[in-house]
């Protein structure tokens, strides 16, 4: 991203931003790179937007809807104070706003969908109440098959999404004992899952399918606390 620009402490330039087009199956690309004095953290709000880059000519309503369903973007944030940097990833969704207390901020984005998209970002002073999320897609599960995934940084809750009438068991991992994981909060779900709180120290989520004769693809929805 190059050398960061010293603008967090310049009130006359409090809303720097950028907009770019991302192709599918690409890499993370830089959106924001700002920095103030290392010793003076500021409360800032970051706004991320995403929209489909659609060739509208000759497309009917069904085609437009299908292309909009392909709009999926993820952001990577590096927030720092005094030389230390914390990194996390979050969903852009249909747009997201979140706040952080930082002296430096770098934001990049990636297109996880199947069509080109326009992604924009800007940063301003002040705070906004928001609960960013991170969505992780699992592989299809058969009966008694398991899906294990690491819990991302700053995760506060997790909810596993799946089709109706597909029972499952969700376990939260507390760490390793030799080569084996220790699991707690062994929870059986045959109805809609409630978000499970993630205590400090949990490191992994395990999903076990109990749907006989059927496959389903689980989706993990993490709520993040910044």
Image: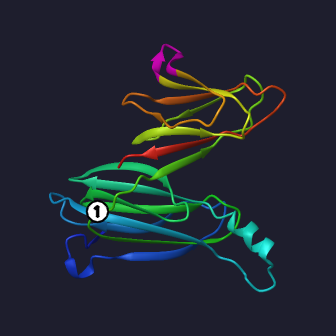
Q: Position of residue 132 (x, y in %)?
A: 44, 53
How many numbered discs? 1
List x then y, in percent, for residue 44: 28, 64
In the rendered image, which quarter is residue 18 located in? bottom left
x 68%, y 68%: residue: 68
Q: Nearer the viewer, residue 48 or 157?
A: 157
Residue drawn at (34%, 76%), measured in percent from left and top? 16
Q: Is residue 114 visible?
A: yes
Q: Is residue 183 above or below residue 6?
A: above
Q: Is residue 90 above or below residue 45?
A: above
Q: Main secondary structure of the magenta part?
A: strand
Question: Residue drawn 81% across and 78% down?
Answer: 60
Q: Which residue is mark 1?
A: 127
Q: Please name whichever residue, 110 or 143, is drawn nearer the observer in this view of the structure.
A: 143
- Furthest residue toward top: 178
Residue 209 vs residue 106, the one in the foreground: 209
Here the colouring is: rainbow
Where disc 1 sits, the SS reads loop
Residue 29 place in picture, x, y as percent: 51, 65
What percent of the width, then of the height, locates residue 21?
58, 74
**Lateral position of residue 116 relative to residue 66, left or right:** left
The segment highlighted magenta reads 174-185
Visible residue check, residue 3: no
The reply to whether the magenta stretch includes residue 93 is no
Examine the structure image and report whether residue 181 is included in the region drawn in magenta: yes
Q: Residue at x 84, y 28 (%)?
A: 213
Residue farthest along the bottom direction in this orientation: 57
């Amino acid at each position: 991203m190059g050398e960061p620009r010293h603008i967090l402490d310049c009130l006359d330039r409090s809303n720097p931003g950028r907009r770019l087009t991302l192709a599918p199956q690409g890499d993370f690309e830089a959106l924001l790179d700002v920095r103030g004095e290392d010793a003076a953290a500021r409360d800032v709000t970051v706004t991320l937007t995403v929209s489909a880059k659609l060739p509208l000519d000759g497309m009917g309503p069904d085609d437009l809807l299908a292309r909009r369903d392909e709009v999926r973007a993820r952001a990577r944030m590096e927030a720092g104070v005094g030389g230390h940097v914390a990194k996390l990833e979050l969903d852009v969704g249909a747009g997201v706003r979140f706040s952080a207390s930082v002296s430096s901020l770098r934001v990049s984005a990636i297109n996880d969908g199947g069509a080109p998209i326009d992604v924009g970002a800007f940063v301003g002073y002040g705070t906004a109440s928001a609960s960013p999320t991170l969505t992780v897609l699992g592989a299809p599960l058969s009966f008694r098959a398991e899906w294990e995934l690491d819990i991302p940084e700053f995760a506060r809750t997790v909810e596993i999404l799946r089709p109706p009438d597909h029972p499952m068991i969700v376990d939260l991992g507390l760490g390793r004992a030799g080569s084996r994981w220790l699991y707690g909060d062994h929870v059986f779900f045959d109805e809609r899952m409630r978000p499970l709180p993630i205590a400090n120290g949990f490191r992994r989520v395990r999903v076990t399918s109990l749907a006989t004769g059927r496959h389903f693809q689980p989706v993990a929805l993490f709520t993040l606390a910044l």
